[in-house]
Image (cartoon, grey):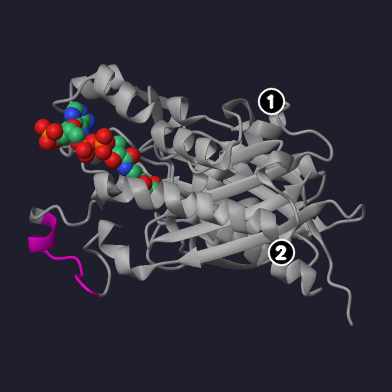
Amino acid sequence: MTQVRTARVIGLGSYLPERILTNADLEKMVDTSDEWITTRTGIKERRISADNEASSDLAANASKQALIDAGIKADQIELIIIATVTPDMQFPSTACLVREKIGAENAAAFDLGAACAGYGYALVTAQQFIASGTYDVVLVIGVEKLSSVTDWRDRNTCVLLGDGAGAAILAPSDSGNGIMASYLNADGSMAELLKVPAGGSRRPCSCQTIEDRQHYLKMKGNELFRPAVRMMVDAAEKVLKKCGLTTRDVDCLIPHQANIRIIKAVAQRLNIPIEKVYINIEKYGNMSSASTAIGFHEAVKFGKIKKDSIVVVVGFGSGLTSSACVIKW
Ligand code: UT7
């Protein structure tokens, strides 16, 4: 039997736009309060891109950092996979734009749509190309400019979202450490709960769709809460079981950052102490695919992940999708 190769992360980077939008700022924009946002979501502030900054700009900045961290040049990258629901345009893919921006002149490139679970989906996709021997160096990015689909009149959603990018470079492992197991899932029966209704082939852009504010993100947050907890717990348990581990073996859990109450409920059900859970929602809000991507980079940067640490990255999002990876660092 052919031996499959283990993929490991050799470099990480992230980028957050400079502009900070605080809960106090939002109090002036919609009928909300710092108290409501803090207690119901855990968010204190979020980053908002400049008008001339698109997802490819955020992604390119994060990628340049990951290249430095990995100690390699852009022309060594063979594939770029970008997880995003906020591409610069419908096409070309944002991955092609990033290829150009960073000078990855030997790379194939494509975008992947799995919403907030997208970073995990992209890591697993990269892993497959490495395991099969197709590529040796793959750049994975989770990036969102959610402010571009935020309805700033809708208090139900505008207080939750933020912009950012996280990048990881994967290569074959020489030590055996790396992605140990993965789990992906999707349930289209609840697709209506979180979407941008217009601007696609179902409801192309028209004066009417714009007037109806259908190009903005719509979410039934209350109905998503329980599936979010259930699907992340399920994904984490299944992926750990695949590699013969239990939640007691986990040194760092990096969950999608949709709501502090969801994160705490997931940790509690998995019986993982909250100190082992990486949380940055208070600074950045929900950045969809970028949340776990940035969380992973920060957890390494801030020493929460050390050599041989067992890390679980778990995500959940529109679709509904869920993803989980166990990584031995
Ligand atoms: O990224 C992946 C997918 N996202 C998620 O999975 C998000 C999951 N859902 C959530 O995180 C929470 O459901 C939310 C944070 C979205 C909402 O929290 P909640 O505790 O479920 O609140 P709710 O929707 O049940 O609303 C409670 C009340 C409502 O008022 P009434 O009807 O009780 O009078 C809302 O109108 O809170 C009101 N409300 C607000 N009040 C002040 C909603 N948004 C706001 C706001 N400020 N920004």
Q: Residue 80's x, y, as percent? A: 63, 61
Q: Residue 299's x, y, as percent? A: 66, 32
Residue holding disc 1: 302
* Helix, strand or loop under label 1: loop
Q: Closer to the camera, 210 or 292?
A: 292
Which residue is depicted at the point 27% across and 18% down? 34
Distance (Cα) linking label 2 and label 1: 25 Å
The residue under label 1 is which amino acid type?
Phe
Please determine whether, in this image, residue 312 is positioned above or below residue 132. above
Q: Residue 317's x, y, as percent? A: 41, 54
Q: Closer to the camera, 77 or 35?
A: 35
Q: Which mark is residue 127?
A: 2
Q: Which residues are magenta?
A: 202-210
Binning the other alpha carbons within 10 Å of mark 2 as few (below 14), some (14 to 19) or many (20 upward) gives many
Please determine whether, in this image, residue 147 is positioned above or below residue 298. below
The C terminus: image quadrant: top right
Please determine whether, in this image, residue 257 is positioned above or below residue 240. above
* Helix, strand or loop under label 2: helix
